[in-house]
Image (cartoon, rainbow, N blue to C red):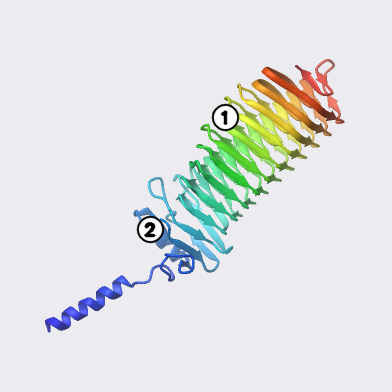
Amino acid sequence: MKKLIYIFAIIIAMQTANAQQFGGGDGLSEGTAYLIESQAHLEELATDVNNGNSYAGKYFIVMNDIIYNVRNVIGNSNRRFEGIFDGQNYKITLAINLSTTDYIGLFGNVSGVIKNIIVDGYVIGNNNVAGIIGYAYYYTTVTNCKNLAYIIGNNNVAGIIGLEGSRSLTITDCMNSGDIIGNNNVAGIIGIASQGGSTIINCMNLGNIIGEDYVGGIIGRNTGGGSVKMIDCINSGNIIGNDYAGGIIGSNSGGGYLTTTNCMNSGNIIGEDYVGGIIGRNTGGGHATITNCMNSGSIIGNNYVGGIVGSYAGGGIVTITNCMNSGSIIGNNYVGGIAGGLSMSYSIVIEIVANYGYVKGTLYTGGIAGEYNYYNNGKIENTFNTGVVEGPAGTTGAIIDDQ
């Protein structure tokens, strides 16, 4: 009898050890990835991660479209997913209504690889809110992800990543087409890059972005002194905010190094101060290079309004080369076809730039720049303006008004 009980106990133990997780697989390789087939499997993953199992280095694949009524997000402020999650281009339709909760999205907190996911539906949260990842921690890679959902939050709100806290984040081939509504640090791709170190390649925003301060088509704000590279990025959504609004990025500050190459804005941008077709404002010692960028959207604001950049100030090194504006630029003070105001920077270089758009202002209004002042090195050459520059007599210039 004891022998039979012993054998029975062994069988039960083996069955328990071999109990199937998710829809199958063991997660040890891409070929034996855990299978995600239902809401129940996503809930299982959320429960495990939030209880301390990060699934570091484990593989997951989505096998079909899923409707996900979310009660527990995958990861939170203290726990994060650290595996490799492949959506295989299936659609996950989210229903998230957690308006007082931070770290909200399909994933709340990630330090891993997220790829090939399409998210639809709606996401409502508080801070660090996005369709794909609320908070991206160190060594996160996001590839070929699309947000179609509308997103509503407070601060750090975006289509792909709400808050970037990684010094080595790479985002490639991602797109947002959902409308994004928030207060500060609101964007189509990343709400705020707080550590820098981000590389964003071939990403696009098609959705309307509505916020208060630091609002952008690709990034709302870069701060913390890190470097950010944006290459081949496009915004065609309308951007509506107060201060620091840009078609590609709202603001670069805190000594960060910003490189913007081959980027384009065609969306209309409406704000108050520091409003630009590519960048709203660069300040605080930040160094910025803008190359081969174009704006065709209408840019409307109050002070420091420009077709490429609203304002550069604060002791950094600024280079704007081979850029063009064809959109209408309308403001009050410091208004320019390329830049509203360029001042206080250690070095300012503007060359091979052209404005074809209508420019209208009240004070300090120019076809290329409304204001151009520098501490040390300055160069402006090979500039071209054919746009009409309109303002009170004595307050406008075909190229620069105030120098």
Q: Reading the chain from its start, which is encountered first: label 2 or label 1?
A: 2
Residue 311 seen in the current view: yes
Circle 1 SS class:
loop
Identify residue for label 2. 47
Res 116 quadrant in image: bottom right
Q: Depth check: give the residue in front, 381 or 152.
A: 381
Left or right: residue 283 compared with residue 17: right
Q: Residue furthest front?
A: 377
Q: Nearer the viewer, mark 2 or mark 1?
A: 1
Task: Give the answer, above or below, for where 197 lies relative to 39.
Answer: above
Left or right: residue 176 compared with residue 75: right
Residue 213 seen in the current view: no
Residue 382 in percent (x, y) is at 82, 28
Residue 320 in percent (x, y) is at 72, 31
* Classed neighbour count for the residue bearing mark 2: other residues with Cα under 10 Å, few (<14), some (14–19), many (≥20): some
The residue at the point 40 percent across, 45 percent down is 77
